[in-house]
Every structure is written in C-alpha cells, then in structure tokens.
Image (tube, rainbow, N blue to C red):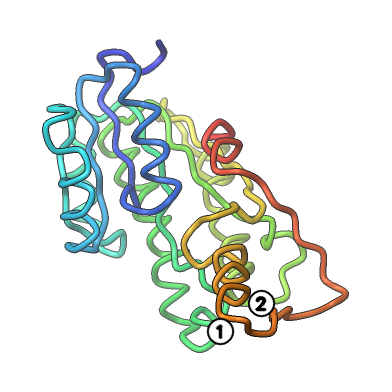
Amino acid sequence: MFFKDKSILIIGGTGTIGKSILSNILDEKPKVVRVFSRSEYNQFLLQEEFRGKNQNIRYLIGDIRNYDRLFSAMENIDYVFHVAAMKHVSFCEYNPFEAVLTNIFGTQNVIKAAIAQKVKKVIFTSSDKAISPTNNYGATKLTAERLITSAEYSKGSSETIFASVRFGNVMGSRGSVIPLFEKQIKENQKITVTDLSMSRFMMTLTQATMLT
C-alpha cells in the first residue's frame, strides 16, 4: 500500500478522473486526502457521496490561479495529483486567455507551491491533444507539460519529483463523446462527428486512473 499513512492533495478532485483517483487512494488507507477544486456545488456532491464512508477527506475550495491558496493547500502534503484544467476544446478556443491562465499559469503555481512546501512528488495529467496541437487546449497542455519537465530538470536543490502522463479520451468522463452519442441515440438525433478523418484514442476510466 504505497499511500498508506501518506498525505495526498488532488487538485481538480471533483472531476471524473479526480474522483476515481480519490476512490483508489482511499483503499490504501492514507493519512489524509485533500480535495481541491473551485466548484462549491461539486464539492458538496462529493461530500454527500462519501459522507459516513471515510473520515480522512478534506474539502478545499480554491482555484489553481491563486498561488497563496495552493501554497496553503499543500502544507504537509506528500503527493500531489494535478488533474485540474479547462479541458473543453470549444471553450478554450473562444476563451483562449482563460485557458492560458488555468492550464499554464495554474500549472506554474502548482510547481512553485510544491517546491516551497517540499512536496515529494507531483503528477500532472496531460492529453494526447498536446501532440502537435491544432487547437488552444492542446497548445496549453503542451506548454504545461514543458513547465513540468523544466521543473524536474531545473529544480536545483529541491527534492520534489515532477512527472507528466498523457491521457487519450477517457470514456464516460464529463463532456466526452460517448455520453453525447448515447444522448443523441436515445433522442433519435443524428450522431455528430466533428471530422470524419480524425482518429480518437479512447481509454477507460480505470486505465486512466492506473496510469497516474
């Protein structure tokens, strides 16, 4: 049990991936798991879901754009899972600088806070869209990857380890194509495909969780 008696922070912990990571880590009996996200409503839903099941979860409202809040959240933390992001391609296209603030500046805040608080390891989750990106989402993810890589190789005396993993399309995650296809089929609508020549690389939620 790798995480037994360890302190964990899951940034973006109310999302599909974050919740799956949380469930798996709780099985290993950690000392504490802090769930960090900016959605008060999603925090409430998660709290209700785990009410009475585990006493080691702490729910923190915050935004990765806010360095001071991240610094506070990482106090006495051993391992950080950074799964927070603006991830919907269309929203990143129409709000490009918002995507930059969250996906790039937010990641840099995570790096700085982790080094300052002497976190043992930070795992950053990226996307296959960071490969030769053709949209703003992919470009911000690629830049965030570069920041993580740079932090690992240019950290000086810091002992914090930084690593990245790339996901394909996680089946069933919020905003993914499979729930959309299911809805369209049930409502007898046409199935919408953005580009017939495009390849999509799919993975299950379990595969994505184990990859981290």
Residue that appears at 39% across and 45% down: 18
Query: Picture quarter containing residue 133?
Result: bottom right
Residue that appears at 68% across and 62% down: 129
Residue that appears at 41% across and 14% down: 2
Label 1: which residue? Answer: 93
Quadrant that contains the N terminus: top left
Q: For the image shown, how many numbered marks are present on the structure?
A: 2
Horizontal and vertical percent position of residue 175: 50, 67
Indicate the secondary structure of the residue bearing disc 1: helix
> Which mark sits nearer the N-terminus, 2 or 1?
1
Query: Picture quarter containing residue 35?
Result: top left
Q: Are marks 2 and 1 in contact (CB under 8 Å)?
A: yes
In the image, farthest residue toward the bottom: 94
Q: Nearer the viewer, residue 102 or 51?
A: 51
Residue 135's disc number:
2
Horizontal and vertical percent position of residue 208: 57, 41
- Taking 107 as reference, is 90 left or right? right
Q: Nearer the viewer, residue 32 or 48?
A: 48
Residue that appears at 82% across and 71% down: 198
Horizontal and vertical percent position of residue 69: 18, 54
Q: CA distance from mark 2 to mark 1?
A: 7 Å
Q: Nearer the viewer, residue 201 or 2?
A: 201
Horizontal and vertical percent position of residue 151: 50, 43
25 shown above or below 188: above
- Label 1 sits on what residue type? Glu
At label 1, counting other C-alpha atoms closer than 10 Å, the crowd grade (few under 14, some 14-19, many 20 or more) is some
At label 2, counting other C-alpha atoms closer than 10 Å, the crowd grade (few under 14, some 14-19, many 20 or more) is some
